[in-house]
Image (cartoon, rainbow, N blue to C red):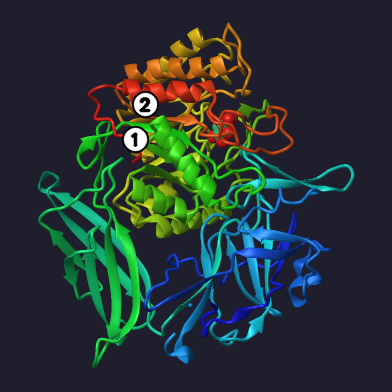
Amino acid sequence: MFPSCIPRLRPSAVLVLLALTGLSSCADGGNWKTLKPQANAARELVSLDGIWNFALPTSIDLEEDKAWTKNIPPSLQIPVPASYNDIFADQNIRDTSKRRNILRFDAVTHEARVFINDRDVAGHIGGYTPFEVDVTDIVAPGEQFRLTVAVNNILTSQTIPPGNVEVDETGKRRQLYNHDFFNYAGIARSVSFYSVGEVYVDDITVTTEVKDQGKGATINFSATTNKDPKSSRPRVTLFDEEGNEVASASTLQGSLELSSVHLWQPGVAYLYRLRVELLSAKGKDTLLDSYEVSVGVRSVEVRGNEFLINGSPVYLTGFGKHEDSPVRGKGYDPAYMIHDFQLMKWIGANSFRTSHYPYAEEVMDYADRHGIVVIDEVPAVGLNIGLSAGTSTDEPTLTFSEKTINNQTREVHAQTIRELIHRDKNHASVVLWSLTNEPASNEEGARAYFEPLVELARELDPTRPMTFANVMYATPEADRIMDLFDVMCLNRYYGWYVNTGDLASAEIGLEQELNEWQDKYGKPIIMSEYGADTLAGTHTVIAVPWSEEYQTQLLQMSHRVFDRIESVVGEHVWNFAGFQTASKSIYRVDGNKKGVFTRDRKPKAAAHALRTRWLEEGVRKGQGNVTAAA
Ligand code: BDP
């Protein structure tokens, strides 16, 4: 049923996807301070997912083409959500008149311009966080309109992630980048229309404090409204999982005290629901708006070299992941999402890192619901000009300079931090923010670049610790930024990129380095990446690189070392599954094959070995392991 107050999209919705096209004007006007749309007594929600018409631009200049002023023919069509790359064989009603209609994009990778009919209505930079545009004054309820979205997939030194475009001998533009996953682009996540009344809740922040050794808790909340708060009366209610009201307040900011509480525990999630309602300022309790957030009561703390959740040390088991699947690319896929979580449960993983960008909001909701611990990462990957597919070039590099990663890049990076923390701040599953993956933290300029970003993140969220994933070249002596962070996430490839095929030497090297980190900083270490490319089905008696035996033995060697280093509080194998990478790398054969599952989620021998360690043997006895996902 189509709600009466929302404008109608023409069946032949149009979409222009601009491959390798520069958007001349800055994409702004898209409001990124957006709450995930909800349908309830006060809000309507209509999904715009489906089949969209698709076209590549005829000109590199978007203004010249003005494709949004025409109807794009249905000769090429794409599914939304999905990355467009692998699709082709070539390459909500009461007072209708006073409601606000908002168009929301969960993610357009990497940059979007949104047109309604002939009008440019919004833009957004950043491929993995949502934005919205209020279209109330642009299209009338019931009116048909043409929606065009221009998508820009270009990466430069001033985008996050960065990249650069080269023009080859034939005059063809070619996108280069330093990160090891395919530059999928498009309308990767859902598109929706939602409607709110004239006065609505536009943000909610919830933080929790665990008290009396876990018996009680304080829930702090702060909600804001789009209008003068005096134009409505707030009613805040906390419900338990059975739907019983357990606390309430009548202010937009305040605290709720619970004398007995069900904690959110890794593996044993418990979610309260905090409902914020806006009632008419005078007279009857007319409902103007309503919005609910899930609340998991838990604490996170770093003490010495321990990582504590609810005051108990935890040991993380799991993976660095990717949002990647055949055909859909980085498009949100609920079937793959839930299957991945089921495989993580099967193998005994209690956690994962959103390497190397924020994942779909549905993923975060699922992790909250099922007690899976998340290290949440911004898309700042590849801030390392000398690194390519885990290997270093021999050329001297200068990653941080006026001509490369500069102040402008840092401002874009800062915005990714603002948008991620704004989007994910209320997720109990998120216990650590990761501000970058494998930057050139050994190079000059790294400290000046990162110090203000860490400060910003701490201002935005004083409740969670900060980390970044350190690259192997930035050793304890060479790295210049580790002291700025709380947890040391280390990506190490002993036995793969170094000591290839020689696990005995790899074991010595890995232990030596981990001891150096431990002695220098005394902070918790999470092994955020370790692993080996493996061609499923390749078996050898003597374990050699690329065989299933070698992957298993490399992981076992790494685990022996981790078990000897007190500060190691977590192990995330690289990677959960195989994933697509840039076509230009000769280190990759149809993608990165370090997954312990293949790209189509079939287990390699290493998956069974991990299951034995994580579920049957139990890692690091006495260390307060978190149980595997429920
Ligand atoms: C690290 C990166 C990761 C790569 C991995 C690899 O953080 O994105 O995919 O190495 O080389 O450099 O497999």
Instruction: Give the left or right position of residue 607, taking residue 386 as reference.
Output: left
* Residue located farthest toward the front when viewing the structure as drawn: 1
* In the image, the residue with mark 1 has its CB under 8 Å from the nearest atom of ligand 1: no
Number of disc labels: 2
* Residue with the mark numbered 2: 614
Amino acid under disc 2: Trp
Amino acid under disc 1: Ala
SS at mark 1 in the image: loop
Ligand 1, image quadrant it occupies? top right
Vertical position of residue 354 compared to residue 278: above or below:
above
Question: Going 46% across and 23% down the picture, which residue do you hit?
Answer: 608
Label pair 2/1, CB-CB below 8 angstroms = yes
* Residue with the mark numbered 1: 628
Mark yes or no: residue 517 visible.
Answer: no
Question: Going 29% across and 72% down the picture, which residue do you hit?
Answer: 276
Q: Position of residue 124 (x, y in %)?
A: 58, 64
SS at mark 2 in the image: helix
Q: Which mark is residue 240?
A: none
